[in-house]
Amino acid sequence: MAKKKKKTTPRPPRIKTAAAKSRDKKTIAGIEAMAGSVVKSSLAVRDPHVDIPLRTVTNTRFNKKRRMLEMGSNTQRRNLFNLGQAKKFMQTMLLAKGCRELVGADKTLSLRGMYYMSLHTIEGTKEKTFDDQGESDTILEDLEVALDSAREELHVFAKKRGTMVGNITIVDNGDEIDCRRMGTGGYAIPSICEPDVIQFKECEADFVLHVEKDTVWSRFNEDRFWEEHNCILTEGSGQPPRGVRRLLHRLHHELKLPVYCLLDCDPWGHYIYSVIKQGSINLAFESQRMAVPDAKFMGIRAEDYERCDLSDDVRIDLNDRDITRAKQIMNYPWFKDKRLWQREIKRLLANGFKMEVESLITKDISYVTETYVPERLAARDFLD
Amino acid sequence: MAKKKKKTTPRPPRIKTAAAKSRDKKTIAGIEAMAGSVVKSSLAVRDPHVDIPLRTVTNTRFNKKRRMLEMGSNTQRRNLFNLGQAKKFMQTMLLAKGCRELVGADKTLSLRGMYYMSLHTIEGTKEKTFDDQGESDTILEDLEVALDSAREELHVFAKKRGTMVGNITIVDNGDEIDCRRMGTGGYAIPSICEPDVIQFKECEADFVLHVEKDTVWSRFNEDRFWEEHNCILTEGSGQPPRGVRRLLHRLHHELKLPVYCLLDCDPWGHYIYSVIKQGSINLAFESQRMAVPDAKFMGIRAEDYERCDLSDDVRIDLNDRDITRAKQIMNYPWFKDKRLWQREIKRLLANGFKMEVESLITKDISYVTETYVPERLAARDFLD
């Protein structure tokens, strides 16, 4: 085609929704309250401090009723006049200030960007405010819990991964995106999937099929699985990032769509399922925004080796790490009293090998889209 | 919103274009010619063989006139009746057969999928056809050069990475995608960007800005850089995969768009630029489909530390590996006679530190989009 020169119709400027405004107002209020208390202590000649809820295994509990991981109420006090805490105290203030600026400017920044934004050499010394990005990432998580404001509410985003297609139209930052017309590439799921950025517009889908890898996703998209089975197809490139988890959560809770997961038959696949379903230990404070306690595990199952009559070639021997990990997962409180999960992991261990979703290709290129998943859906044969 | 239940309008079935048909015909003819020669040798009781062009540094040369890496004419003969070559010969046949099936079925498969498709235990032995996916990936590259058919033409795809937004409308597998209306997420660039899958429809953009990382891309997208500067914005999550490189090549050659690269000031950033510009050694046979010899390097430049008045904090010390790598790159034939590049790398080495694009955030959140890039564009200040 010849290149066309024409004036671009500019997009209408993004109108900040009432929800976004109120969200930002709450975040700013939180940051200012924290700063206010430090100022107050200082003026009263008292040691300023902030209380940070503990993000540790011991302060994480599984809420059986809500079926998700939650953070307990233990906190750690971070004082300015304590040699072991002063640096972290300073870092907490620096990053809180950075977030305040971001929210004020109505901009977002990556984790790496936040690190740079708050990085400087302390006057008169050679000491930097942060040794590396790891330090600032950790403090940002502290801030999330201390302020009860998710990272997304602090206007900070992470590397994005994950793609979506299917019978849904969404609005992303004012742009209407028809996920039925996304070709072979798909819609790249952003890192921030909050309701003020992403709205659901029209959806006829009956369920969400979430697969582990983008290569498997491409197989399903090429076979137009989502069209034939009226669903939404997502992938998270391994352990799904927060954006994908948040989107799955919203699709499930707001649109009442069941979420089925197609993952590898190995401890890694089981852990991905566990995180989607009840949250992760490190982000336990985020479970209520991200967990999908009703998510189902469709496979690959240890029994599929016989059930699908697979050949020896698909077997990948479990190594010591896999075995340790499988046993750990088996003992998670949320798997412990699930008969079928206990049987599944025992069978995985008895098999002595793991299997990937791709191994179904040894049957036929499209066995997974034309036989495996349709059969499981028809029989409603899932692990819960 | 309430979930809407309505009948989905099915997408029209993809109509195979004449270009796609002729492409597949050529691929099939190539595979069948290879198989035919093996059959012919066998029937004549001669040792069957295939000749595989060598993908080595010594068989790679820099074509100064075309300004890209090209593969030389050296080949290696792979015989069936040679103990050291028999396995590879068999693997070559197996994968060629697999590709023939894929093209025949009009389906595509991932590299991992191809491995599984061709994996089996040889009857009467415990020997598998492939020890791991690495073996099949290498043979697939052999097949590409032996058949003179790109991986995409063999219907094989890799993990996809990379995103695009901007003033262009494309058609992907029959779906029209307006890259001006892709919200915060963007269009996920597929692994196969051949003209029979992706067509360009309407484009007002004046150039392509390619950035290294998705987090930097998000900054540019959020600041609507592509709208203000009338361009297309792409990212390749580090070293761009083939899909992204192919797309850049096509945007440049078919739409005559200049390609500007914004990468880190380190040997890794320089190498990304080198690959985009003149191809990679390993994929030298692909250069004519992927290289953009006119691509320009916009930054980050070693002199930016002073020019942009950056603070000490952005300095990341070069390690021994960086230094070795920088010297290697300086001696690449395509950098060797470029005065400005020699100066650039010398200055990087003299500085003793590298800098990331994100380091510009220490100036201001939007310094990179509002000052740095606009200034370079206005001054046409690039390395070539």
Image (spheres, coloured by chain):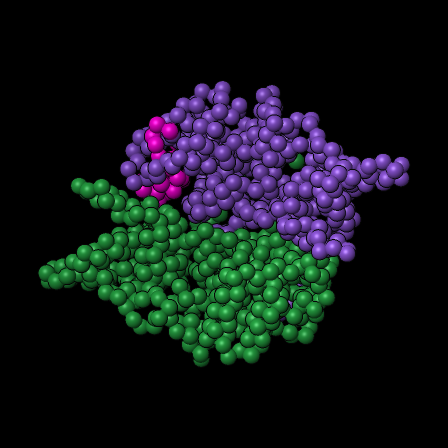
Chain colours: A green, B purple
A168 or A219: nearer the viewer: A219
Q: Position of residue A123 (x, y in %)?
A: 19, 42
Q: Is residue B360 above or below residue A141?
A: above
**Number of on-image labels:** 0
Left or right for B262, reference B42: left
Residue plotted at (40% across, 63% down):
A282
Q: Percent from the top left, x then y, of residue A297?
A: 58, 69
Q: Is residue B378 above or below residue B225?
A: above
- Residue drawn at x 58%, y 38% as measured from the top left: B245
Note whether residue B224 is visible. Answer: no
Q: Residue furthest left?
A: A45
Q: Which residues are magenta?
A: B349-375
Please name whichever residue, B256 or A226, is drawn nearer the observer in this view of the structure.
Answer: A226
Query: Within the image, what quadrant is residue B252 found in?
Result: top right
Where does residue A21 sit, x and y in percent of width and height? 36, 60
Residue occupying the point 44% across, 28% down: B327
| Residue B148 drawn at (x, y percent) | 72, 35
Left-right relation of A140 to A290: left
Is B350 colored magenta in this rendering? yes
> Does the magenta run of residues contain B370?
yes
Which of the 4 quarters of the picture holds residue A359?
Answer: bottom right
Tell me if B106 is positioned left or right of B206 in this view: right
Q: Residue at x 61, y 53 (%)?
A: A215
In the displayed orientation, state which residue is furthest to the right. Answer: B44
- The kind of secondary structure the magenta stretch mainly shows is helix
In front here: B331 or A347? A347
Up the image or down, B263 lies above or below B95; here it is above
Asked if one can make out residue A349 in the rendered structure from this viewpoint, the answer is: yes
